[in-house]
Amino acid sequence: MTERAIRPRRSFIFAPGLRPEIYPKALISGADIVCVELEDGVAPRDKERARTNAMKMFADEAKARQAGKLADDGIERVLRINSIREAFGLADMQAVLASDTPPPVLMLPKVRTPDEVAIVDDLLSERGHATRLHVIIETCRGLEAVHEIAAASPRVEALFFGAVDMAAELRCQNAWEPLLNARSRVVHAAAAQGLDAIDVPHLDLGDLPGMEEEARRARAMGFAGKGAIHPKQIAALNRVFTPSDEEITRALRIIGAFEAADTGVVVIDGKLIEKPVLREMRRIAAVARQMGA
């Protein structure tokens, strides 16, 4: 398993490629991930304009960063392209490969096979881009191959669960119980490769308590974060997915105990703790450190 850099991914929000003026607002929304959207949120007639806008956004930021005018704010910037099985997705990839200032991360939607990820990796490598990958699992074929997809490239850092498309393919209700098995399989595959699993946004904007409850369930399953469809959801998501003081203290105690003991098992508060737990403890400590906790 490849060790990936650990970063907070408690919440994400989309910024439409068609509306560049929303992007700066998304960056100050409090979300850990801001994703410029070229896929489902853009009509076919507007794809080219959205793509041009998006590439300019990333180019402008790169120039500002090089000039020392843009400080590192810790926000992960992502571009969601169209599926590379479609002409729009191929055009998106061509734009990324043609750019000297590519997006730091590409989000790949509707991934069905590991070959799709490997092809994108090969193209980026040939061009010399360090762009990382987030992959959305939202089809039955993708779910069937989720472990192979997660392992298809060291560029992959997160698996996103797409409930709307998955429910449509499964012909089930888009609700927690019917999709529980699918969610579990995505978390399992992500954990096996040391990736973050990110849950789908809660679509009922008027139901903040329901969203928070769903987020708590997702965290209990092993998800690292959850999407938002509006900035007013972000504070609650960040609160749910931020390690508590007690969790941070426990993680640091366990890490310290293993370092001092140099063994595969330690006892904390009378409970036996085995070494595999260390990975999650280190993740909690690293996220807490980056959040200033």
Image: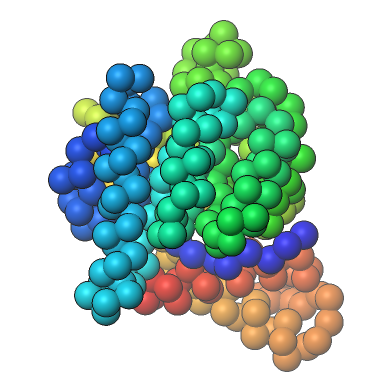
Q: Is residue 256 visible?
A: yes
Residue 234: percent from left, percent from top: 29, 48
- Farthest residue toward the bottom? 260
Which image quarter holds the N terminus? bottom right
Relative to 39, residue 263 above or below: below
Residue 101: percent from left, percent from top: 41, 59
Q: Residue at x 57, y 79 (%)?
A: 252
Q: Is residue 140 left or right of residue 216?
A: right
Q: Is residue 9 visible?
A: no
Q: Is residue 206 left or right of residue 249?
A: left
Total of numbered circles in the picture? 0
Relative to 252, residue 49 above or below: above
> Relative to the observer, which residue lies in front, 8 or 73?
73
Which image quarter holds the C terminus? bottom left
Q: Is residue 221 left or right of residue 60?
A: right
Q: Is residue 60 left or right of residue 256?
A: left
Residue 219: percent from left, percent from top: 51, 47
Q: Residue at x 28, y 52 (%)?
A: 57
Q: Residue at x 21, y 57 (%)?
A: 28
Q: Residue at x 41, y 50 (%)?
A: 78
- Farthest residue toward the top? 171
Relative to 194, residue 149 above or below: above
> Relative to the observer, which residue lies in front, 233 or 114?
114
When asked about the image quadrant of residue 15, the answer is: top left
When asked about the image quadrant of residue 52, the answer is: top left
Residue 99: percent from left, percent from top: 43, 53
> Relative to the observer, which residue lies in front, 182 or 101?
101
